């Protein structure tokens, strides 16, 4: 006879634990209106372990305690479109894990989401409760309280005891950003190799993925910092992907770098998630040019080459005639272009938010040189410190997350109707932002790497150990047969 399952009585909010994720206490809102449970996660990072898809992510389990930051890993069940109670649909990672509540434990699926203003870090949906719990919607915390002090030991732990071996992929080993990252790594006792992305090569068909450089195998890095220039996106992301196949923590994933590099793709992803942007159009046929100009509200308008950076492929067309001739000229070059509403009120000024993980660690305001509507520093603009609004902060973090970037420079224009995101950079420079804000951005990046690389490294050790055990077992069997 099947054993009767003991049902847990739960109220409209409950404390529970997710032991396999290392979360001893989290307060969830019971939401039977939702099918799938949701966990508020950031810095979502996919990897594989012994051929199985996995995901790693950060959680701030206690809303009042932002200092408690726990990094978790879980098997990835898949990705699904989930519509939240506010009607927004989002492609979410779905994990499988154990839920512990009221003395009972069972397996359940949880979707990972990131909503800035979610009062509860977790929503407990119908599916997780089915057959396991009885909901009493007028009661609260029927299963008792769990204290945030359960996290004390976890937080007190040093992020990383041993020195890390870090690889910086860059074609410019001597530029400011590279120098600062090396300097900061060495100051913390880590070692950092700087290697030209283009000189990495690999056998992509090998069963044991590896990356080679100058006749040597590049092995056993704890983390890779990809700083992939726009001109080497395709090759550079292939190198990063190879490191991902080796389960090395890459600060930004190859997929995320690709997404941010393709301006059109990035715009579509950002727009789909409700991030404010200037009205933007795109067409391939010259016969559609006129309609496209109409869509963005006519001249003046901004035209952008899809793969441009540092302001090089960005043109302001003051009149419709000028717009048409620029569009046709670009077409002659067989170049893909975006047509965008010109945000005049920004007055040649944009805001760069430097995002690491789920925080804006620094922000600056950049103003173009006299008479230039482009504020890129490479074009002779100048920068000053700026206080950003809550909305700007939330938008920057969300934009980075939508593209899947852990480290990003989010550029936006300040308008009366809120921030309008222009682009999200996957290799933001450190020079401008450090000198303007006086902040140690390289240090922030290393803090983040120390936290993330630790979980990945621990898993690799476990994986190596289990592989060794299997090999030993196999050789024992051979010896005894
Ligand atoms: P790039 O990748 O070349 O830096 P951006 O899209 O960031 O291209 O544009 C460069 C600069 O031009 C921006 O920093 C901003 O100052 C200005 N700019 C771009 N688009 C607009 C727009 N739609 N309205 C007003 N200014 C813009
Ligand atoms: Mg820019």
Image (spheres, helix red, strand yellow):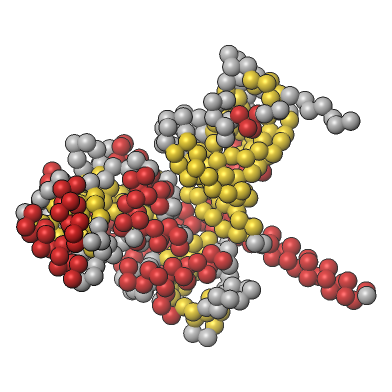
Residue 11: x and y in percent read 61, 19
Asked whether residue 9 is in view, the answer is yes
In the depicted view, which residue is nearer to us: 476 or 364?
476
Q: Residue at position x 63%, y 50% from top?
A: 75
Instruction: Give the total of numbered labels.
Output: 0
Q: Residue at position x 34%, y 61% from top?
A: 261
Rendered image quadrant of residue 247: bottom right
Residue furthest toward the top?
138
In the figure, is residue 419 to the left or right of 456? Answer: left
Residue 299: x and y in percent read 10, 50
Residue 47: x and y in percent read 57, 58
Residue 313: x and y in percent read 20, 64
Give the answer, above or below, for where 81 lies relative to 403: above
In the rendered view of the protein, which quadrant contains the C terminus?
A: bottom right
Residue furthest toward the front?
287
Q: Residue at position x 23%, y 61% from top?
A: 285
In the depicted view, which residue is nearer to us: 47 or 4?
4
In the depicted view, which residue is nearer to us: 307 or 446?
307
Rendered image quadrant of residue 335: bottom left
Q: Residue at position x 72%, y 34% from top?
A: 105
In the figure, is residue 377 to the left or right of 261? Answer: left
In the rendered view of the protein, which quadrant contains the N terminus?
A: top right
Asked whether residue 192 is in view, the answer is no
In the depicted view, which residue is nearer to us: 128 or 192?
128
Give the answer, above or below, for where 53 lies relative to 233: above
Give the answer, above or below, for where 461 lies relative to 361: below
Rendered image quadrant of residue 273: top left
């Amino acid at each position: 006879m099947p054993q009767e399952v003991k049902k847990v009585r739960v109220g409209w909010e409950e404390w529970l634990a997710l032991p396999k994720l290392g979360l001893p206490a989290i307060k969830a809102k019971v939401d039977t209106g939702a099918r799938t449970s949701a966990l508020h996660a950031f810095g979502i990072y996919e990897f594989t372990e012994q051929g199985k898809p996995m995901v790693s992510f950060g959680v701030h389990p206690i809303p009042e305690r932002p200092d408690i930051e726990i990094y978790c890993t879980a098997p990835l069940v898949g990705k699904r479109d989930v519509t939240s109670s506010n009607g927004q649909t989002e492609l979410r990672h779905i994990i499988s894990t154990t839920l512990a509540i009221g003395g009972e434990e069972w397996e359940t699926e949880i979707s990972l989401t990131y909503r800035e203003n979610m009062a509860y870090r977790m929503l407990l949906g119908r599916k997780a409760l089915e057959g396991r719990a009885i909901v009493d919607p007028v009661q609260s915390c029927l299963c008792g309280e769990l204290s945030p002090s359960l996290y004390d030991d976890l937080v007190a732990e040093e992020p990383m005891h041993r020195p890390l071996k870090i690889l910086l992929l860059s074609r410019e080993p001597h530029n400011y950003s590279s120098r600062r990252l090396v300097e900061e790594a060495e100051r913390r006792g880590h070692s950092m190799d700087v290697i030209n992305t283009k000189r990495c090569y690999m056998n992509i068909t090998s069963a044991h993925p590896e990356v080679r450089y100058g006749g040597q195998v590049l092995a056993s890095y704890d983390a890779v910092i990809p700083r992939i220039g726009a001109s080497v996106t395709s090759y550079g992301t292939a190198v990063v992907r190879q490191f991902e196949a080796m389960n090395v923590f890459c600060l930004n994933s190859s997929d995320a770098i690709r997404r941010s590099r393709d301006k059109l793709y990035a715009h579509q992803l950002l727009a789909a998630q409700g991030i404010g942007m200037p009205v933007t159009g795109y067409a391939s046929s010259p016969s559609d040019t006129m309609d496209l100009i109409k869509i963005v509200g006519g001249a003046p308008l901004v035209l952008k080459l899809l793969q441009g950076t540092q302001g090089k492929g960005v043109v302001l067309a003051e009149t419709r005639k000028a717009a048409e001739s620029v569009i046709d000229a670009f077409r002659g070059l067989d170049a893909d272009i975006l047509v965008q509403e010109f945000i005049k009120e920004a007055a040649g000024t944009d805001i760069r938010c430097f995002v690491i993980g789920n925080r804006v660690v620094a922000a600056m305001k950049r103003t173009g040189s006299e008479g230039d509507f482009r504020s890129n520093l490479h074009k002779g603009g100048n920068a000053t410190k700026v206080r950003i609004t809550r909305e700007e902060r939330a938008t920057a973090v969300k934009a980075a997350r939508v593209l899947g970037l852990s480290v990003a420079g989010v550029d936006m224009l300040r308008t009366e109707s809120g921030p309008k995101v222009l682009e999200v950079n996957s290799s933001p420079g450190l020079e401008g932002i450090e000198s303007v804000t006086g902040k140690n951005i390289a240090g922030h990046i290393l803090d983040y790497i120390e936290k993330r690389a630790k979980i990945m490294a621990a898993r690799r050790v476990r994986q190596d150990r289990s592989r060794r055990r299997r090999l030993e077992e196999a050789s024992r069997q051979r010896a005894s047969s």
